[in-house]
Image (cartoon, rainbow, N blue to C red):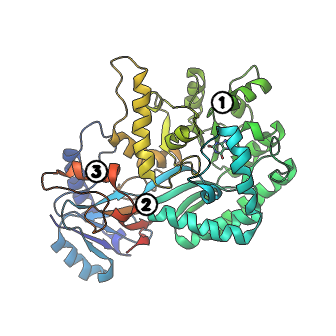
Amino acid sequence: FSGTLVHSTAANRMEMCQRRIIEKMVHTALNAWPESCWSVNTVYQGRRLNALASGRSPVVFVDDASCVGELAKKFEFNERDVITLKDNRQFMIPGLVDTHIHAPQYIFTGTGYDLPLLQWLEKYTFPSESRFRSKEFAQNAYRKVVTRLLKNGTTTASYFATIHYDATVVLCDVIAELGQRAYVGKVCMDRNSPNYYIEGTDDSIKNTDRIITHILGMKNPLITPVITPRFVVSCTSDLMKKLGNLAKEYDLPIQSHLNENKEEISMVKDEFPNESYTAVYDKHNLLNGKTYMAHCCYSTEEELNLMLERNSAIAHCPTSNFNIRSGVADIKHCLNKKIKVGLGTDVSGGESPSMLVAIRDCVKASNVISFGKSKGFTALTYEEAFFLATLGGSQVLGLDNKTGNFEVGKDFDALFIDVEVPDSPFDCFNSDDTKDVVQKFLYLGDDRNIRKVYVAGKLVAGR
Ligand code: XAN
């Protein structure tokens, strides 16, 4: 088993070669993965796999090292950009997509799991987020969280920042410098919040408009602004309406929280007794094909149907749902209904910045759901969870034309995995077949196994 990965600025000129080879690769992948794996072409691993990619250029594969040699001469590849995949202990997977993470909450992740959502927000979250009024503080914290995510293979992340404009600019600058693909939202909240961490409705709108203008002005194709009302509990109707207008004016994605915790839901019910939580967002023009909502643990059939009708998506955050004892979302049911679903770490509700943990907890959450189901129910498989962490996530963010798998024409967002690094946290044996090796990595691996991380063809982490 051998292979070579090449980066070249000339790669996009090789369409003829591409097509023949991609067919071969897909064939190999189809043979290697069972039908239950929805993303059959997301793991390319096998005899003499060679991937060819370039700067921001499309993904191209070649299947033969000697062929790469010829192409290298013709297109002047840089030797430095050639990786040889030694055997089935080294493989490439698409970059991981975290559809829901609170960047500022990284400062207290791993602590404070003794309280449920609303009390957790009050005691731990709001005091921590308020510290981002200092740009200097933000600079240090945001550099750490983005670096940590890249190291763990998160090539795309959808961030909640804080209410602060300046600190959100800092987050964008750090993301741009470190080369991640990201959605960034300045958090909006004008009620039910402590006086040290709240904004007026007009300020919230003004600063959202400013951050949108700033991000669009960066002209960085990897960074997108996202409209971010914290949740109904902390936003007035006036604020939500105005945010709905901004989303429409700029044609932007929208992210928020929905049906996470019973106490939260009853607060919304008290205020809007005649409509569902989901319908409240809808009424404020915040539920459309570019909307993705975190959690949805308690969404009713009627609410899921409304999401489906609007083509809105779910950011499933099982780790957080377990930690702050919110609930468990029946994601199998949502997928059966054809609702788009991705995975989120939800740091710091979720303690780990690693999407591998989200993948594992996604399977476990589905197992928990299965306890209350009758015989015919099958829980989500790890392959399905892997799909949610890659292509599923990119669909949620509307980025599936750019990332999520290695389809020819997409950007090269990829992880080079090595399960036999000297400090690997697990062991493989000769009898392990290819699928077992990938499964072991998903269940037991960590950032030590992620040797190189590429976003749009650029090496952004690794050695
Ligand atoms: N609802 C929330 N849920 C969560 O998991 N984290 C948060 O920060 C938050 N804010 C509102």
Tell me the amino acid under the disc marked 2: Gly
- Identify the mark at residue 440; answer none if there is no mark: 3
- Residue 261 % position (x, y): 63, 32
**Residue at 47% across / 60% down in the picture?**
155
> Are the residues at dot 1 and dot 3 in contact (C-beta closer than 8 Å)?
no
**Residue at 55% across / 21% down in the picture?**
301
Quadrant where the N terminus is found in the figure? bottom left
Query: Is tag 1's residue or tag 3's residue first in the polypeptide sequence?
Result: 1
On the rendered structure, is 307 left or right of 72? Answer: right
**Residue at 57% across / 51% down in the picture?**
347
Residue that badge 1 annotates: 278
- Identify the mark at residue 153; answer none if there is no mark: 2
- Residue 397 % position (x, y): 54, 48
Tell me the amino acid under the disc marked 3: Lys
Query: Is tag 2's residue or tag 1's residue first in the polypeptide sequence?
Result: 2
Q: In the picture shown, does residue 291 fall above or below 399?
A: above
Decide: few, some or many residues near mark 2? Use Cα within 10 Å; few <14, some 14-19, many ≥20.
many
Q: Is mark 1 on a helix, strand or loop?
A: helix
Residue 306 occupies quadrant: top right
**Residue at 22% across / 48% down in the picture?**
436
On the rendered structure, is 255 left or right of 152? Answer: right
Kindly give the residue lying farthest to the left in the view shown: 431
Quadrant hosting ligand 1 = top right
Q: Which residue is more in the foreground, 183 or 194?
A: 194
